């Protein structure tokens, strides 16, 4: 685990807003749509994709399934562009089955607590691809203060 200062981030993707119980159906559905359309996104930095947890309020989660872009030039129909400021994050390289990503995030939250930092709901799971093969390699980030 490493504390890093991430530079500003600009991304284009599909926004998902749903209660916890619906995230497990809404997010996979949104990924399917995203992977059908992502080739229309211009100025992509690479072809690795992110699930950004933007916030949680009253059990309603806001996620952005997206790709990082150099700048928002044009946004395909049904998608949005968003920019995020430079922030401090705890970063961890997750290697293993997809289902163990929550375990890795739990370890990160424990590390944050044990090392005097505070975390909020903003986190990034970077490394998705249209055809993931396990074991996967994702870089996980949790914003810290």
Image (cartoon, rainbow, N blue to C red):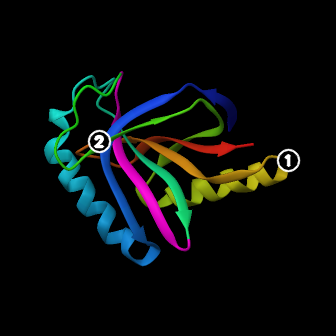
Which residue is under mark 2? 129
Question: Which residue lies at the image location 41% right of the left edge and 31% below the top edge?
Answer: 10
| Picture residue at 80% right of the left edge, 54% below the top | 113
Residue nearest the viewer, comparing 144 with 78: 78
| The label number, if any, that marks residue 116 in the structure image | 1
Identify which residue is drawn at 83% across, 52% down.
114
Lateral position of residue 127 relative to residue 132, left or right: right
Residue 63 magenta: yes
Q: Residues within 10 Å of mark 2 (few under 14, many from 20)?
A: some
Per the image, label 1 sits on a secondary structure element best described as: loop
Which residue shows up at 50% across the image and 51% down it? Answer: 54
| C-alpha span from label 2 to label 1 | 34 Å
Q: At which x and y percent is residue 55?
A: 53, 57
The boundaries of the magenta stretch are 58-70
Q: Earlier in the sequence, mark 2 or mark 1?
A: 1
Judging from the image, what secondary structure is the residue with disc 2 in? loop
For residue 102, side relative to residue 33 (left or right): right
Does 134 appear in magenta? no
Quadrant position of residue 80: top left
Does residue 141 sit above or below 104 in this rendering? above
Label 1 packing within 10 angstroms: few (<14), some (14-19), many (20+): few
Q: Nearer the viewer, residue 82 or 117?
A: 82
């Amino acid at each position: 685990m490493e504390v890093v200062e991430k530079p500003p981030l600009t991304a284009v993707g599909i926004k998902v807003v749903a209660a916890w119980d619906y995230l497990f159906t809404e997010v996979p559905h949104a990924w399917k749509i995203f992977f059908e359309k992502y080739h229309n996104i211009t100025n992509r930095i690479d072809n690795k994709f992110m699930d950004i947890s933007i916030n949680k309020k009253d059990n309603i989660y806001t996620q952005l399934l997206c790709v990082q872009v150099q700048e928002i030039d044009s946004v395909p129909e049904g998608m949005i562009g968003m920019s995020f400021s430079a922030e401090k994050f705890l970063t961890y390289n997750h290697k293993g089955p997809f289902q163990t990503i929550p375990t890795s995030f739990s370890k990160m939250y424990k590390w944050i607590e044990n090392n005097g930092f505070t975390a909020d709901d903003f986190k990034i799971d970077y490394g998705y691809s249209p055809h993931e093969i396990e074991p996967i390699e994702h870089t996980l980030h949790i914003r810290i203060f």
